[in-house]
Image: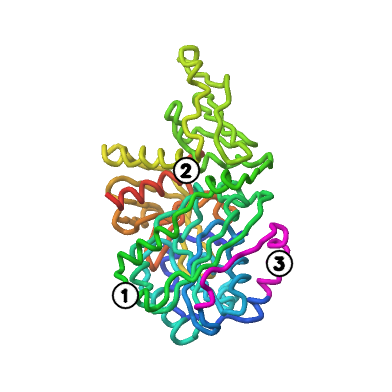
């Protein structure tokens, strides 16, 4: 999927009017039916089926909040299929509206900025359930999982449940991540996909619980590990491209500690700094391959060089997080890179304004560019996570920062800049 772009100067973009807020409109039944029709082929191909739990408690015409884990683009097709006949308003990223605002609004989409405080979103959701009488589909993680485990949920989610006062339903998918992990560049694998639809909370149960109790319930329900699931289910992924792009997730070598030197090709991950290589097995585990280390201590550590430091990808990713946190605590963490900058100001295009520089350290982000006219700073307290993405709309890996008025999409100009590390650093700074 691509996005409309347009080259402009920063001053020209500044002169554009800010996009006006529009109330959500009731979704088109015809478009919803078309989505389900278009989804049939892919869902049949993956042998899709689902089960329900407690859904008899939900009235046929009763609006609800549907919370769904976010694994891949198939998620929307699943939601429209399992909630057939129930008009859905879909909370989605505002850049999805670029070049197709009318279509997105009539599908029922509500635009919002990822990881940006947006009080208007809550008002839009209230408008949907109270005025339009429609249900809301929300991906509370806001971004696809990088490592197949849950990403942080916003602390405001429990408050949102209190405000909406509607039943909460959860859709959990199985196999969607393994079929199309974000790092693998839209290369689809032959994996069965299923889902479970659960009536999670009634309005009465929401009312009687405190916000922290609601958040605890949601955190527990959004705790999953899809690489573990793959192994337990015996799902074998035999495609010969399964490790392509894996360096986007596993960017740091646990053997020599080099960063940005790993490279996923075919079914293996290679550290170009020390030569160590791992295979991504058909069951989704990492296995060190023998005889491939070129460090000076190779002969002394011949027995060790076949050691698999982390067979489980989420463990490797969690280790990287701990390494980032240690850097932050020591005051040594810093990102300082040249970037190409694009700006989202309205839904007509993404405006490319040229080169700039992005700096990230303990005081947050600083972005400069626009021939010296752009200077944007963002505190570590601004957000609990970061909009970082791989091969964003086929343009490249991005780090996105900004506020409710303007978003800045930063494309690293240098190769091997791990945007995953920047997301981890953002989350750890917020926690600290």
Would you identify the image quadrant in which residue 421 lies? top left
Q: Residue at x 66, y 54 (%)?
A: 192
Q: Which residue is mark 3?
A: 40
The kind of secondary structure element at disc 1 is helix
Q: Is residue 420 magenta?
A: no
Q: Is residue 51 magenta?
A: yes
Of circles 2 and 1, the one toward us is 1
- Percent across and percent down for residue 260 are 47, 36
Q: Earlier in the sequence, mark 1 or mark 3?
A: 3
Q: Which residue is mark 1?
A: 208
- Percent across and percent down for residue 377 are 32, 55
Q: Is residue 110 above or below residue 344?
A: below
- Percent across and percent down for residue 279 are 59, 33
- Work out how far the residue at label 1 is from the one at label 3, CA to CA, in angstroms: 40 Å
Task: Kindly identify which numbered label has been placed on residue 314.
Answer: 2
Residues shaded magenta: 34-57
**Is residue 302 something one can see in this rendering?**
yes
Is 21 on the left or on the right of 294, as rendered? left
């Amino acid at each position: 999927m691509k996005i409309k772009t347009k080259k402009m100067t920063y001053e020209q973009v500044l002169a554009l009017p800010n996009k006006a807020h529009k109330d959500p409109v009731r979704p088109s039944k015809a478009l919803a039916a078309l989505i389900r029709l278009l989804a049939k082929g892919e869902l049949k191909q993956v042998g899709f089926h689902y089960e329900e739990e407690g859904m008899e408690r939900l009235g046929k015409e009763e609006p609800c909040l549907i919370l769904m884990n976010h694994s891949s683009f198939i998620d929307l097709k699943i939601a429209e299929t399992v909630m057939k006949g129930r008009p859905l308003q879909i909370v989605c990223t505002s850049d999805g509206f670029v070049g197709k605002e009318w279509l997105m609004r009539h599908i029922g989409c509500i635009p919002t900025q990822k990881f940006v405080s947006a009080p208007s979103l809550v008002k839009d959701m209230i408008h949907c359930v109270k005025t339009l009488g429609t249900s809301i589909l929300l991906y509370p993680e806001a971004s696809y999982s990088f490592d197949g485990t849950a990403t942080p949920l916003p602390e405001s989610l429990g408050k949102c449940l209190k405000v909406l006062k509607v039943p909460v339903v959860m859709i959990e998918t199985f196999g969607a991540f393994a079929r199309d992990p974000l790092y693998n560049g839209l290369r689809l694998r032959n994996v069965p996909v299923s889902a479970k639809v659960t009536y999670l909370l009634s309005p009465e149960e929401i009312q009687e619980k405190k916000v922290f109790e609601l958040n605890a319930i949601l955190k527990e329900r959004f705790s999953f590990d899809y690489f573990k699931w793959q192994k337990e289910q015996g799902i074998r992924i035999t495609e010969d491209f399964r490790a392509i792009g894996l360096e986007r997730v596993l960017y740091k070598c646990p053997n020599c500690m080099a960063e940005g030197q790993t490279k996923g090709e075919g079914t293996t991950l290679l550290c170009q700094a020390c030569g160590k290589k791992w295979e991504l097995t058909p069951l989704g585990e990492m296995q060190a391959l023998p005889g491939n280390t070129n460090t000076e201590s190779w002969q002394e550590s011949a027995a060790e060089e076949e050691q698999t430091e982390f067979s489980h990808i989420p463990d490797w990713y969690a280790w990287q997080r701990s390494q980032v946190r240690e850097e932050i605590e020591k005051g040594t963490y810093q990102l300082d890179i040249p970037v190409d900058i694009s700006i989202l100001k309205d839904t007509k295009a993404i405006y490319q304004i040229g080169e700039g520089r992005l700096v990230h350290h303990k005081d947050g982000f600083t972005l400069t560019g626009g021939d010296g006219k752009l200077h944007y700073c963002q505190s570590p307290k601004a957000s609990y996570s970061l909009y970082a993405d791989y091969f964003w709309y086929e343009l490249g890996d991005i780090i996105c920062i900004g506020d409710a008025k303007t978003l800045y999409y930063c494309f690293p100009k240098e190769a091997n800049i791990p945007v995953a590390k920047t997301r981890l650093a953002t989350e750890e700074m917020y926690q600290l």
